[in-house]
Amino acid sequence: MKRISVFISALALMASVTGYGQHTIVEQWRTTDSIPVPESVLPVPHRNELYVSLIDGNGNEKDGKGGVGIIYKNGKVKDLNWIAGLNAPKGMALHKRFLYVADITDVVVIDVKASKVVKTIPVPGSVFLNDVTVDKKGTVYVSDTRQNKVYKITGDEPEVYLEKATSANGLKAMGTDLYILAGKELWKVDKNKNKTVIASGLEQGGDGLEPAGNGDFIVTCWPGIIYYISPTGSLQKMLDVQGIMNTADLAYDPVTKTMYVPTFNNYSVVAFEFK
C-alpha cells in the first residue's frame, strides 16, 4: 500500500490551516497504518471508535475483497477485518442496531451487536450505489451516482424514489427532508419531492455531506476539496489538496468539532478540527 510522504503531509496540513475565509480546519492526526482504500467513515455510538468502509480494490468491482473496519478516534487501528467478504463498500448509515452499507448493487445490513452480515438487499436496476442515509422511521435512502437516481428501501423492498438527480452521491435525511449532493449542487427535497437548490457552483462533484448545525453543511469533493456551505448557499473552500490526497465521505462530530475524512487512494483517515 502507498503511504503519504512527509512532504505531502506537510502540504496538506499547510492547506488546512491557511483557510479561505471565516472557517478553518486544522489537521489533528492521520492514521499511520495503511487503510485499504477507505471510502466512508461513521462514528460508533457511545464508543471512542469509527466504522470505516474499506473498498480494498476497484470501486466498481465485485471481488469480495471489501469490508468494514474499526479504528479509534485517535487514529489507531482496532480491527480492519471486523466485517469481511464485501465487494466495494461505500456509504454507511446506522439505525438502531443495524448498519446499512452501499455495496455496488446491494445494500448490506450488518447487525453491529453480533458483528455479522444478517442480510443483503439487492437493488434492481442499480449500477453504482454510493451513499446511504436512514430517517427516523427506519426508511433507507441510497444514491446511485451513475444512474442519477436515489432509491428508497422500506421493509427491505427497494424502489426508485427520485430520478434525474445528477450524479447523486452524498445523502442526509433530516426531519421530513432529504438533502442530496447532486453533482456540483446541494439539493433539499421535501416529503412531496419538491426540490430546492440550496447551493451550486462546487468545483467538483460533491461526495460527503454532514450538517454542521444552524442549517450549515460541510461537504467534501472526492478529488480533494472540503467546503463549508452556509444556510444561504454561500460556499467557502476550507481545504483544497487536489493532486495531493482524496477527500471522500466524511463524518463530523459537532460536540468535539472534529471531522474524520477518509482519503481513498491515499490509504489513510485524517482528523481535522473545525473552527
Image: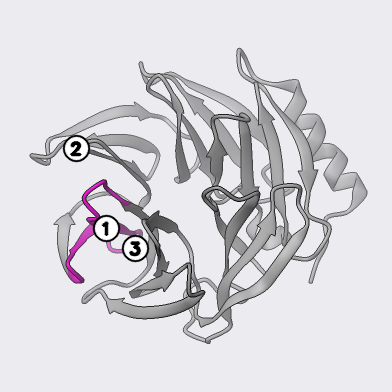
Q: Nearer the viewer, residue 234 or 99?
A: 99
Q: Which residue is mark 1?
A: 140
Q: Report the Cα–Cα distance between label 1 and label 2.
A: 13 Å
Is 122 displayed left or right of 128 in the figure? left
- Mark 1 and mark 2 lie on one chain; the one further toward the N terminus is 1
Q: Secondary structure at mark 2?
A: loop
Examine the structure image and report whether residue 155 is included in the region drawn in magenta.
Answer: yes
Is 115 displayed left or right of 99 in the figure? right
Q: Secondary structure at mark 3?
A: loop
- Mark 3 and mark 2 lie on one chain; the one further toward the N terminus is 3
Residue 44 % position (x, y): 54, 53
Which quadrant would residue 263 be assigned to in this image?
bottom right
Q: Report the Cα–Cα distance between label 3 and label 2.
A: 26 Å
Residue 215 is tagged as none
- Mark 3 and mark 1 lie on one chain; the one further toward the N terminus is 1
**Which amino acid is tagged 1?**
Val
Residue found at x 56% / y 36%: 253
Q: Which residue is mark 3?
A: 146
**Which amino acid is tagged 2?**
Thr
Relative to 221, residue 58 above or below? below
Question: Residue furthest toward the left?
Answer: 192
Residue found at x 53% / y 41%: 220
Dot in front, 3 or 2 = 2
Task: Give the residues in magenta.
Answer: 134-157
The quarter of the rendered structure image containing the C terminus is top right
